[in-house]
Amino acid sequence: MHPPANDRLNLVSVPLRIKGTFLPATLLQPAVTQPARFRAGLAERISQGGALLQTAPVVLDLAQVTVSDSLQPWVEACRELQVQLVAVRTDVPELQQQARELGLVALNGSERSAPAANQEEVPRTKIHQGTVRGGQQLLCETGDLVIMGSVNPGAEVLASGHVHVYGALRGRVLAGIHGDRQARIFTQQLDAELVAIAGHYQTSQAADWLHRGVAGCIALEQEQLVFSSF
Amino acid sequence: MAKVIVVTSGKGGVGKTTSCASLGSGLALRGHRTVMIDFDVGLRNLDLILGCERRVVYDLVNVIQGEASLQQALIRDKRADELYMLPASQTRDKDALTLEGVQQVIAELSRDFDYILCDSPAGIERGAQLAMYFADEAVLVTNPEVSSVRDTDRIIGLLHAKTLAAKEGRKITEHLLITRYSPERVHQGEMLSLEDVQEILAVPLMGVIPESEAVLTASNKGIPVIHDETCDASQAYRDAVARLLGEERPLRFTEYRKQGLFSRVFKGGR
């Protein structure tokens, strides 16, 4: 007669979680162009105690040498020696294609270049004059958000950079929404409903310090949101 | 050109209609031709507070749908010569109102009147948004209580976003009217203080109406409380009307005074 007690719980439980992360991987950089010489050198290295290569994920980085024709002998060399190859890093499109066909991840070789000063991507600060009212949402995806007024209960302000509130902070505030862990929240009077930096959040029920009513700054330090008064 | 003033709050039961009736009466008593429009279609109340419910023939929806003329629908107040009201429909719902219809009604009234008071329904939906759409000024009726303050805050956000003034880049003049204020309960820490409410809403104060039994009595009799000159609430509404007209008046009835023995004996306490 009783409905399954778990039904309600199942409704609210989440079947999976997605989190951004940086996993350590070993870069393996061949310094020769012949696969045979590479294989010999790799075997020797493993016999000398390079066991880590056989347990940790390894990325084959082909930036140093020009591998003209086929990726196959390089990958085979790694597999024969039980190296846990997961990806190949190269700029050559043909090699990237081959890597995918061999069941590996193809990574781009070059690091992303920093935006130049005259590019659109340059961080832009958004300034809001006046109080942000309950039910209103202010978003700045390109940099800092400055509010020359208060953020009232029920209001939400979000920025990819810092959030400055030159009034009372009584609503919800999220800084570093694209993952910037250096982002901070500044306010003249802290009385927030929720604060978050780079996905680490704190609700006011769980944290009395959100109602200190004083001026200060919130930063993310060692996975913890930390408040310091001015 | 008339000044269009919306009387709004977000939350229900805080005294929008009561305040609208008294402010409208007060403006008319000061010699300004004033018309009040009841936007609470389906839950019409303003006619009851004014005591003219038995004279309602046509209503706002009839006018908008072309079933009656404005002159036929307007009801003249018995007590204040310069005061008229346009009742809401009791049998229709808020979907019967159209933006164009409301615009026409306001434009037409605007020729004959100095002030148009729009009595908004509670909530933030279509009815409330229509009531505020053409406003030049807004009276924000708020009780000294957390949920009322929060709902008023939400309404201010809508005034800044969803009105004609906002779309044309004009600023609506906002007035905060705090109703049902009890200095004694504020003193005891049971009620938000004037300062608390003002700090959150950051809107100029137009008046503070003290909690008073006379308000309920007046509503039940169908006489706006402003006519009962003996009570505090009437005096406070008169002050609020004066401030709406740009006069300066000191705040009254906001200080807690400990009752002396004599007044307790003679008034029989509370």
Image (cartoon, rainbow, N blue to C red):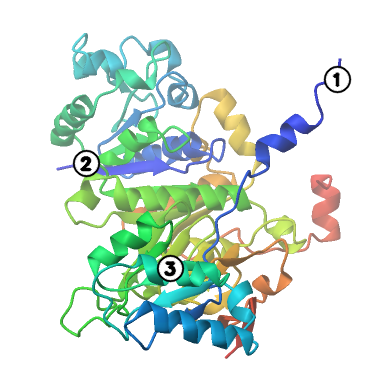
Gap between marks 2 and 1 measured at Cα: 66 Å
Name the residue that disc number 1 marks.
Answer: A2
**Could you tell me which residue is drawn at 63 percent across and 90 percent down?**
A48
Q: Nearer the viewer, mark 2 or mark 1?
A: 1
Q: Up-down: is B179 above or below A86?
A: above
Badge 3 amino acid: Val
Q: Position of residue A82 (x, y in %)?
A: 58, 69
Left or right, residue B11 beside residue B6 = right
Left or right, residue B91 beside residue B264 = left
Name the residue that disc number 2 marks.
Answer: B114
Asked if labels 1 and 3 share a chain, the reply is yes
Q: Up-down: is B115 above or below B71?
A: below
Classify 10 Å Cα crowding around label 2: few (below 14), some (14-19), many (20 and above). some
- Label 3: which secondary element: helix
Name the residue that disc number 3 marks.
Answer: A75
Can the viewer see residue A63?
yes
Do the CB atoms of the residues marked 1 and 3 lie less than 8 Å apart? no
**Could you tell me which residue is drawn at 65 percent across and 87 percent down?**
A49
Labels 1 and 3: the sequence-earlier one: 1
